[in-house]
Amino acid sequence: MNDVRGRKGRRHWQKPVICHISVMQTTLRLDDELYREAKAEAARLGLTLTRFLEEGLRLRLQKSRSSPNNVPVRFRTYRQGRPFPFDDQRLKEVANREQQTADLVKLKGIGR
């Protein structure tokens, strides 16, 4: 607890506030034209592209939750019998390498 003084100079105790903010970063592969349209619309609305995409995702999820045809989907899973061979760091490396390859392919296509 922290000792603080109020408006009239009286001392009182205040509990410290603990705040944890979690932000996740991810990479998306978007069609070039869709990206340009979204970025322009976000700018027109005075939003960041991130905020614009978050709002769009929330609207879509809200719509799907309220749909009367909302039927749970079951995915078939298979047990391999051995542990997954990659840790988080290795998965990030693989994902980054794939993204770089995709970006290079895209850049080569632009120069044609």
Image (cartoon, rainbow, N blue to C red):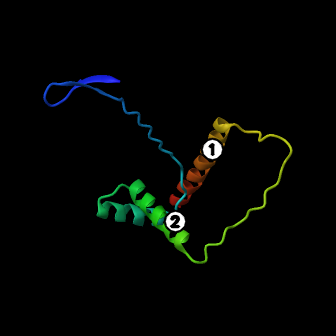
Query: In the shown orientation, is residue 103 left or right of residue 45?
Result: right
Q: Nearer the viewer, residue 64 or 52?
A: 64
67 relative to 47, above or below: below
Q: Residue at x 45, y 64 (%)?
A: 56
Horizontally, residue 59 falls left or right of residue 27, namely left
The residue sitting at 15% across, 25% down in the picture is 9
Q: Residue at x 60, y 44 (%)?
A: 96
Which x, y percent locates residue 111? Answer: 51, 58
| Closer to the eye: label 1 or 2 | 2
- SS at mark 1 in the image: helix
Q: Hey, which quadrant is residue 70 in on the image?
A: bottom right
Report the residue at 36% width, 55% height from top: 48
- Above or below residue 71? Residue 7 is above
Residue furthest left as drawn:
8
Q: For the residues marked 1 and 2, what is the alpha-carbon distance in whole angstroms?
A: 31 Å
Q: Nearer the viewer, residue 7 or 95?
A: 7
Furthest residue toward bottom: 68
Density class for disc 1 (Cα within 10 Å; few <14, some 14-19, many ≥20) is few
- Amino acid type at circle 1 is Arg
Quadrant hosting residue 4: top left
Res 11 quadrant in image = top left
Determine which of the numbered discs, if any, sits on residue 31 in the image: none
Please state which amino acid type lies under the numbered disc 2. Answer: Leu
Query: x, y percentage for residue 108?
Result: 56, 55
Residue 22 image position (x, y, % from top left) = 47, 42
Reading the image, the residue beneath label 1 is 97
Specify which label sits upstream in the sequence, 1 or 2. 2
Image coordinates for residue 109, horizontal then vertical, percent:
55, 59
For label 2, the residue is 61
Q: Quadrant of the N terminus?
A: top left
